[in-house]
């Protein structure tokens, strides 16, 4: 019997905890706030930003939002980032990706102060993660760890295959897993005999952007499979894993949708709360 | 037949190339310079710093050296770092570790500007490496890659076991190997059945600080074994690998001494040269 991991429920529990902490902070007049920046007319980005803003408001946090037109210049966006960076009411800044092609996304992301980097995507945050120092971690890989913890899947000494070495998931997740004592194998497009690699793993995390890449030939009986992929198809959303074919093989598996996706938003709430706490500590030190 | 990789010879070739490039740069009046900072009376540190200064002078570069006493304060060392950071003649700054216990080494390292971070150990450099951006990489893992390249060991698609997840070697080396297309498994003290992990690898890199940890039970016939460990024993230096026992099993193996060790100094020379070039480019942009 393969169990489907209910990411929606786990994410909801985390969001309720965040809302409680926000309520406590609000009683002392400190309300965390997230600033989302949306540039241009990408419809999917608009949907994602709307969902994040809804979640922020549900958690009782302040919603700051900036929209810039499709033809915005590098200086236009930089000015908005700098203004939000300087605003003490803004705990976290999220620059929705992708940006229009005339913009240098990396340079804009790196303008976000490390204490407000709720997406954990600045070079500075990557350095803090690599060094194991205090910092905000990217939401999706943090969500994967929270999911595994909620499911009580042991990480210390576990063999984990991370399939995909990307900035958003594979790289940061590898650091997070190793910090928890997992033995991690990173596989990617140049890996020869992927199935031989993933079949050794107790936990397989897939974040490749290749729809249906992983099937029964890749998974050993009793493994836990985490599917980070998300693809829009005529018949609805699907992931990087052919989940139906893993029934009876995997011990547990995340669905798409309803698996890792909701966790990403939940961890954005957690990061905004942590950013607010971090910012308050720094102000206390300066004052 | 197991071949012993001659790290000393490969390192010497790299150092000669650096000396040639330095001579060319010197003809236009730009001579790279390395500032070494030694704090206190650790005899091993004194030996290492002396070797680095000798190599710098041999390469035709400028040798700036600062010694601070064992009881130096955080502010004392910080002031020296800041002065060297501001000095345009200093291309690179190396703060010899370990520091006396009253000093916060991480905070002092992070004062080194990223363009002068020839040891590649600042949080900022770790971020640049993690993001795959331009930056100076730690010398020992860069040396391992150079060694494998010099030996024409293919990395793309190769299965590599990195044993040890430390700041100096394991973490940065994992990024460097993945960038080259290797499939990397990271093992460490919490790995259960280390031999099962390492026996799958085409290349085993060992950087654990545990003398003689790796023996014939860990290595599959024909593998390449890179021993980063270095231990002083009554009968001389030895590594993390029981090399003699691998004779006839490994295809190639690095000796201790004369393997990775000389490469570390060679890569420090390369980094100092690159830092000088990077600094010159930045000055040109500012001017």
Image: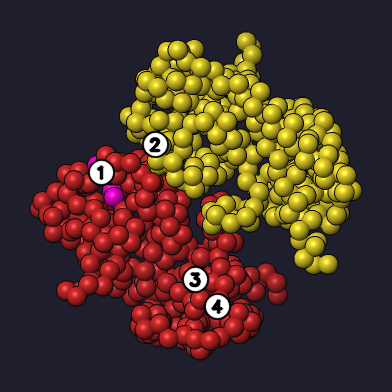
Chain colours: A yellow, B red
Magenta stretch encompasses residue B203: yes
Q: Secondary structure at mark 3?
A: loop
Mark nearer the N terminus (1 vs 3): 3
Residue B250, position in %: x, y?
17, 50
Residue B79 falls in image quadrant = bottom right
Q: Which mark is residue A159?
A: 2
Q: Percent from the top left, x then y, of residue A147? A: 58, 31
Residue B28 visible in image: no
The stretch in magenta equals B199-204
How far apart in space, not on screen, are marks 2 and 1 (Cα)? 13 Å
Instruction: Specify the subunit that label 2 lies on.
Output: A
Circle 1 or circle 3, nearest the eye: 1
- Category of crowding for the residue at label 4, using alpha-carbon neighbours closer than 10 angstroms: few (below 14), some (14–19), many (at least 20): few
Question: How far apart are the two marked residues, 3 and 4, measured between alpha carbons?
Answer: 24 Å
> Which residue lies under the disc numbered 1?
B195
- Contact, CB < 8 Å: mark 4 with mark 1? no
Number of the label disc, if any, that sits on residue B118: 3
Q: Which residue is mark 4?
A: B102
Q: CA distance from mark 2 to mark 4?
A: 39 Å
Q: Secondary structure at mark 2?
A: strand
**Disc 3 versus disc 4: nearer the observer:** 4
Same chain check for tags 3 and 4: yes
* Rendered view: A31 above or below A2: below
Between label 4 and label 1, give the one nearer the viewer: 4
* Pointers 2 and 4 within a single chain: no
> Cβ–Cβ below 8 Å for labels 2 and 1?
no
Q: Please tell me whether residue A227 is drawn above or below residue B209 in the rendered image.
A: above
Label 1: few (<14), some or many (≥20) within 10 Å?
some
């Amino acid at each position: 019997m393969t169990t489907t991991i209910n990411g929606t429920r786990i994410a909801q529990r985390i969001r309720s905890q965040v809302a409680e902490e926000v309520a406590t902070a609000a009683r002392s007049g400190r309300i965390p706030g997230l600033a989302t920046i949306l540039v241009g007319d990408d419809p999917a980005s608009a949907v994602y930003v709307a969902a994040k803003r809804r979640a922020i408001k549900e958690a009782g946090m302040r919603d700051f939002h900036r929209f810039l037109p499709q033809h915005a210049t590098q200086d236009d966006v930089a000015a908005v980032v700098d203004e939000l960076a300087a605003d003490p009411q803004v705990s976290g800044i999220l620059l929705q990706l992708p940006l229009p092609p005339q913009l240098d996304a990396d340079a804009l992301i790196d303008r976000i102060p490390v204490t407000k980097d709720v997406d954990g995507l600045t070079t500075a945050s990557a350095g803090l993660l690599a060094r194991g120092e205090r910092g905000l971690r990217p939401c999706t890989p943090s969500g994967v760890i929270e999911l595994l913890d909620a499911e009580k899947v042991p990480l210390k000494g576990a063999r984990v295959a991370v399939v995909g070495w990307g900035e958003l998931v594979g790289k940061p997740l590898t650091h997070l897993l190793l910090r928890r004592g997992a033995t991690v194998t990173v596989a990617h497009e140049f890996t020869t005999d992927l199935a031989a690699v993933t079949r050794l793993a107790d936990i397989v995390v897939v974040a490749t952007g290749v729809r249906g890449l992983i099937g029964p030939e890749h998974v050993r009986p009793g493994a836990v499979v985490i599917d980070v992929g998300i693809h829009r198809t005529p018949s609805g959303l699907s992931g990087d894993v052919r989940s139906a074919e893993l029934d009876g093989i995997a011990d547990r598996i995340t669905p798409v949708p309803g698996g890792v996706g909701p966790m990403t938003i939940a961890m954005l709430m957690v990061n905004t709360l942590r950013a607010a706490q971090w910012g308050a500590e720094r102000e206390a030190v300066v004052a």
